[in-house]
Structure formats: structure tokens, C-alpha cells
């Protein structure tokens, strides 16, 4: 299998800028007006039910989030600049 | 940034915040996780009562979390950061407008807050779900609106 190419700093910067940009009031209203589709709704609620069953307390969920972030941070090919993608 | 092997103890951090008496609401993705939505997050976001900055800072400084701005300066700026290996983003304002122009008052959110036990005897305050959704409209970034859709699904899951 071909190893994943590391994105260029310019590509990372572009994605970062897109994900961090502030929507206009009109864009925000438009985004709020789009509900989840039926399939997405069911999938999301199923994921929430699974997560709450697997980690029944807020403390367990928070601990999971710390472990998940550590895994994600250690596996990704790029470093600073994309941290806020996780925020 | 969270670092493998960091001595940071999350339960101790929340215990210190709770014991300080500071009116602090956990917002942002960490609040989504605590409520039951599995999303990736790196930092801690709090909305703090504007009069409780010194109290909050005093509580977290023993963990090496030092504020970037003194309380007076933080009040003027409306936000600051406390960090070491961890990063705590702190919003300090009596009210904050959403990207679509709704003014959200801290005192109102605080009066409707939801309490979560995050360790034995340690209670963390988060906004009620509709209020947490409003706070997600402060930043107005595309991913905030994705989080809002997740929160709306959670709200329906809880029958609200």
C-alpha cells in the first residue's frame, strides 16, 4: 500500500483558513435552517446511544476524549496548525 | 495541547474549579463530550463570570495553568487563555452576541445551568442544551454549525 502523502504547508493553511472562517449572519441562518436528514439523524442518535452506553458517566466520556486525542495526535503526519481542527 | 505523560489530572482540575466557587460554565466541544457526543477536542473552553476571574485563576495556578492576561486586562479583552501543556480558553463577558445577532447573557445561562458529576463529589456546570447550542453560535465557524446539528440530535434523543 502506498503511504499517505503529507499535505503541503500551503494546503494545510488553506484547510485551516476554511475551517476557521466566520460565517456571515446570512450564512449562519442558512446553516441553521438545514436539519439532519433522516438517515443522518438515526446514525447520529445511534452513535450517541452507543457512546453513552459505553461510557455511562461524564467522567468516563471525558477520559475517553483525552485518550482519543492522544491517539489522533500521535498518528497524524502533520503537527501544529491543524490542532484547531480538533477544537 | 494534551501530551502523553502529561502530569495534568483532569479530575483535580475540575475539583479545583468547583471548589473555587467561580461561576464557570464548561462550553465548547469538551461539554459536548461530557454530555454524550463523541467528538475530538484538544482544549477546555469556559465561560466565566466576569467577577470571578481572580478566583478561577487562583484555583488553577497550582496546576501550572498560568493566565496570559491579568484580570483587568482579561475583562477588557473579553477572553484570555491559561496554559501549560494544556490549554484553557476562557471567555469573560456579561453577554456575547451570536454570529446572527442574538445577545446571550451569562447570568441567564448560569441560572439554567446543568450540573454534571465528573468525579466523586465534583460537580461541573455546563449550559442547558438550548443554551449550549447558542454558545456554539458565538464563533460562527462551519464546524460550530456541525456541532449544533449534533447537539440538536442529542436534544431530540433526550426528548427535549
Image: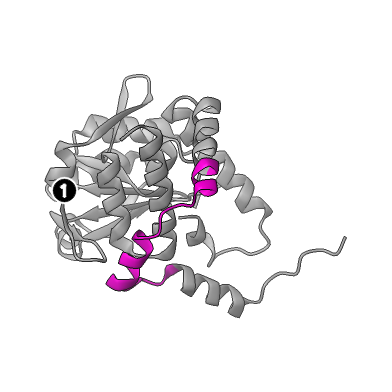
The percent coordinates of residue B14 (x first, y second) are 34, 34
User: Which class describes the residues within 10 Å of circle 1: few (<14), some (14-19), or many (20+)?
Assistant: many
User: Is residue A24 located in the magenta-colored stretch of the structure?
Assistant: yes
Instruction: Locate residue B5: give its quadrant.
Output: top right
Relative to A43, B106 lies left or right: left
Residue drawn at x 36%, y 47% is B65
Residue drawn at x 66%, y 57% is A76
Relative to B25, B72 lies left or right: left
Viewer-side residue, A38 vs B4? A38
| Image: B119 above or below B14 | above
Relative to B65, B111 lies left or right: left
Viewer-side residue, A30 vs B75? A30
Residue drawn at x 21%, y 47% is B48
The percent coordinates of residue A13 (x first, y second) are 54, 75
The percent coordinates of residue B152 (x first, y second) are 37, 46
Viewer-side residue, B145 vs B2? B145
| Image: A27 above or below B67 | below
Q: Chain of mark 1?
A: B
Relative to B122, A17 lies left or right: right
Which residue lies most toward the bottom here?
A: A10
**Under tag 1, what secondary structure?**
helix
Give the extent of the magenta segment.
A20-43
**Does any portion of residue B4 appear in the rendered image?**
no
Q: Quadrant of the C terminus of chain B?
A: top left
User: Is residue A52 located in the magenta-colored stretch of the structure?
Assistant: no
The percent coordinates of residue A7 (x first, y second) are 67, 72
- Label count reads 1
**Does any portion of residue A55 appear in the rendered image?**
yes
Which residue lies most toward the front here?
A: A38
Which residue is under mark 1?
Answer: B106
Main SS of the magenta segment? Answer: helix
Amino acid at each position: 500500500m502506498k503511504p499517505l502523502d503529507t499535505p503541503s504547508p500551503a494546503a494545510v493553511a488553506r484547510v485551516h483558513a476554511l475551517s476557521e472562517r466566520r460565517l456571515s449572519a446570512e450564512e449562519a441562518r442558512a446553516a441553521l435552517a438545514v436539519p439532519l436528514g433522516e438517515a443522518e439523524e438515526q446514525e447520529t442518535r445511534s452513535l450517541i446511544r452507543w457512546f453513552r452506553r459505553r461510557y455511562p458517566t461524564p467522567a468516563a466520556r471525558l477520559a475517553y476524549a483525552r485518550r482519543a486525542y492522544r491517539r489522533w495526535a500521535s498518528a497524524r503526519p502533520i503537527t501544529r496548525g491543524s490542532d484547531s481542527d480538533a477544537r | 495541547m494534551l501530551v502523553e505523560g502529561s502530569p495534568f489530572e483532569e479530575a483535580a482540575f475540575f475539583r479545583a474549579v468547583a471548589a473555587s466557587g467561580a461561576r464557570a460554565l464548561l462550553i465548547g466541544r469538551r461539554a459536548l463530550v461530557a454530555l454524550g457526543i463523541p467528538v475530538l477536542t484538544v482544549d477546555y473552553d469556559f465561560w466565566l463570570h466576569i467577577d470571578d476571574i481572580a478566583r478561577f485563576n487562583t484555583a488553577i495556578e497550582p496546576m501550572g495553568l498560568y493566565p496570559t492576561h491579568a484580570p483587568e486586562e482579561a475583562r477588557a479583552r473579553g477572553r484570555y487563555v491559561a496554559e501549560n501543556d494544556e490549554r484553557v480558553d476562557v471567555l469573560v463577558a456579561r453577554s456575547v452576541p451570536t454570529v446572527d445577532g442574538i445577545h446571550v447573557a451569562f447570568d441567564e445561562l448560569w441560572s439554567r445551568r446543568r450540573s454534571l458529576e465528573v468525579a466523586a463529589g465534583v460537580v461541573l456546570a455546563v449550559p442547558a442544551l438550548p443554551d449550549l447550542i447558542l454558545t456554539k453560535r458565538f464563533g460562527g465557524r462551519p464546524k460550530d454549525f456541525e456541532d449544533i446539528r449534533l447537539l440538536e440530535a442529542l436534544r431530540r434523543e433526550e426528548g427535549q
